[in-house]
Image: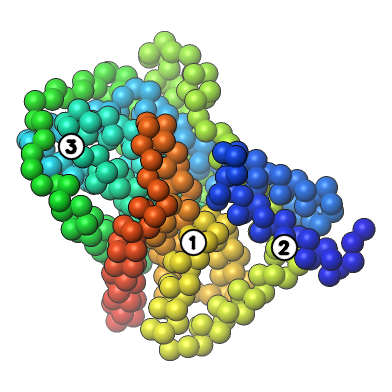
Amino acid sequence: MFSPAAAHLLLIAIVAISIVCMLVRPRGIAEVYWVGAGALLLIVLRLIPLRLAGHAVAEGMDVYLFLTGMMVLSELARVYGVFDWLASVAVHRARGSRVRLFMLMYGVGTLVTIFLSNDATAVVLTPAVLSAVRKSKAEPLPYLFACALIANAASFVLPISNPANLVVFRNGMPSLPHWLASFALPSLLAIVATYWVLRWYFRRELKGSIDADIAVELLSGDGRLVLVGILSVAGVLLAASAMDKDLGLPTCISAIVIAAIVSIKARANPGEIVRDISWSVLPLVAGLFILVEAMSAIGALRYAQAALVWVQHLPSAVGVLLTVAVVGVGNNVVNNLPLGLIAGSTITAAHAQGLIVHTILIAVDLGPNLSVTGSLATILWLVALRREGLHVSFGRFLRVGLVAMPIALGAATVGAFFMRWVMGRV
């Protein structure tokens, strides 16, 4: 139907327009429709064979299962008040100090991100934090930005902390001991650096006291059961990761079991939990897999592969810093989920390993702290704020990100260099 050259140009145009529309959301139309329309158009115009599109979708099965499980757990925690309870405890323990409240909220966000993924922090914890902060009569922006930035800064502590981790390493997830040896120190440095940057940036808003006379939200018996279930699932996932097993199926099965137990005990209709989950995330990810596979099919990713091979021949420090800079900024141009897919495919094709791969993952996870377009989590954070009547402009986020992202990314990269040096001497 098309000449090879015309087909390639049309394919690239469809992919580019789909990703731009996903980021810009013209007329407020959700991201999944733009990506889905682009993927469907590629198939209808036979720019990608149906068999290849199906293979691309099937490759993401572990990611879909992981996201499903995490969304079920997050919705259970929301419905049964776990996040509201955590936020109210933080306000109570702040004892009237805005700085102490900020530190506690940041800590809660860190834990939620590590064990429930960054999307849970952005989507479910953010409204709970806003509600608690409003009751304390504090300026909400520092605490809301803490939710947004920690959702990315803590997202590579564990493989389960960010769906992008599964995407980048979908062809070979490192074992948990290897993961911790590689990313524990860089993660810690990123979390600490982001905290102090936010503390400095919002130093004026964090002066003074807050209303400390706020009762702690009571966590119901069902809420306590959900909390225990979440901790149990975290343990299952850590065990699965330690045994070098895929994380998707254990996450999904564990979440369904917890949801069933809680629903039976509470005599609640599980359909209400299922109904309120943002299922559009799954076809969005599947559509992105098709777009990236289409680009790969016409050889477009060979340029990325050639660039990675070239970088690996540079002096180690130069190659890593160049890669970190390009990937870190690139997240905010195309979003870190499609960039993670591209990075994962490129790493596999180029047979890359070691420090360069570790720093690519760090840049994919941390780079989105530059702007609201950087990751799905930051986009969902912005949507959550709009639902609550708050609006954070692109420029306002960028002013914070221009300070926070480079410092945290630099600190994490230094940590990766140090860990590589230590492992090389062991």
Give the residue at mark 1: 331
**Tally of numbered discs:** 3
Q: Is residue 197 above or below residue 88?
A: below
| Label located before the other in sequence (2 or 1) | 2
**Chosen colour scheme:** rainbow
Q: Is residue 267 above or below residue 147?
A: above
Picture quarter with the C terminus? bottom left
Q: What's the distance in space between the residues labelled 3 and 2, CA to CA?
A: 48 Å
Q: Residue at x 48, y 88 (%)?
A: 314
| Label located before the other in sequence (3 or 2) | 2
Mark 1 is surrounded, within 10 Å at the Cα level, by few (under 14), some (14 to 19) or many (20 or more) other residues, namely many
Q: Work out whether residue 53 can be spotted.
A: yes
| Label located before the other in sequence (3 or 1) | 3
Q: Element type at marker 3?
A: loop
Nearer the observer: mark 3 or 2; the answer is 3
Give the residue at mark 2: 12
Q: Position of residue 192 (x, y in %)?
A: 22, 59
Question: In the drawing, what numbered circle is on residue 138?
Answer: 3
Q: Amino acid at mark 2?
A: Ile
Q: Is residue 150 above or below residue 358?
A: above
Query: In which quarter of the view is residue 254 placed?
Result: top left
